[in-house]
Amino acid sequence: MAVPPHHQHLYTAEEFAAMQRDNMRAELIEGEMVAMPAAFADHGRTASRINSLVGYYVLQNNLGETYTAETGFLIARNPDTIRAPDFAFIQASRLTISVLGPTWGGVIPDMVAEVVSSGERIKEIDAKVQMWLTAGVCLVWVVWPQVRMMQIYEPPALIRDLLDTEMLSGGLVLPGFTAPVAHIFG
């Protein structure tokens, strides 16, 4: 006798928002809730440095708003996907009341940074990058603290790898922003 296929319930963004998660970090990926372990120190330190460097520049130049880890963005519907990058930036001209309120809003970030944790696989990182680019993000930084390197993506693909001896630029998304890559890693 054949066993009927298991049909897992796919959650909507609204169901995900209403869930009791007991302080568990999670994202909603194509309707499935995916738990996320707490980050290691190198991950948190690197994400904090990105926020400090870019956040200060954005604030000083009144360019928009920055968001740190744990801020979710609704990037796809049917099935719903809510991702929480380690850092995000939305240009001032694209900010709306819904973005600033207690919701995931409907505005896709202009830029995100993902810091790679030691346990993440390249396949997982590639999938994240593709989700962000497909959603409409204009600039994605993938930051590898273990090897002190960054990858810069602009649609539709990888633009360049940067070593910690090189200079980082904000491109068209963060005009005028530059910093030594080494400052991201300390």
Image (tube, grey):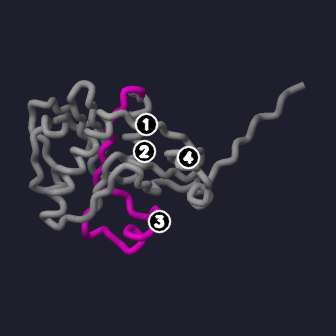
Residue 55 placement: quadrant: bottom left
Tell me the element at label 4. Answer: loop
Distance from disc 3 to disc 1, alpha carbons, whole Å, reads 25 Å
Residue at image mark 4: 30
Q: Earlier in the sequence, mark 4 or mark 2?
A: 4
Q: Is residue 97 magenta?
A: yes
In the image, which disc is placed on residue 127?
Answer: 1
Residues at circles 4 and 3 in contact by the CB criterion of under 8 Å: no
Residues at circles 4 and 1 in contact by the CB criterion of under 8 Å: no
Tell me the element at label 2. Answer: helix
Q: Which residues are magenta?
A: 91-119
Q: Earlier in the sequence, mark 4 or mark 3?
A: 4
Residues at circles 1 and 2 in contact by the CB criterion of under 8 Å: yes
Specify the amino acid type for callout 2: Met
Residue placed at 18% from the left, 63% from the top? 59
Q: Residues within 10 Å of mark 4 (few under 14, many from 20)?
A: some
In the image, which disc is placed on residue 103?
Answer: 3
Distance from disc 4 to disc 3, alpha carbons, whole Å, reads 19 Å
Image check: 8 left or right of 27?
A: right
Quadrant into which the N terminus falls: top right
Residues at circles 4 and 2 in contact by the CB criterion of under 8 Å: no
Give percent across and percent down for residue 73. 43, 56
Residue placed at 75% from the left, 36% from the top? 6
Q: Residues within 10 Å of mark 1 (few under 14, many from 20)?
A: few
Q: Is residue 78 placed above or below 164 in the rendered structure?
A: below
Specify the amino acid type for callout 3: Thr
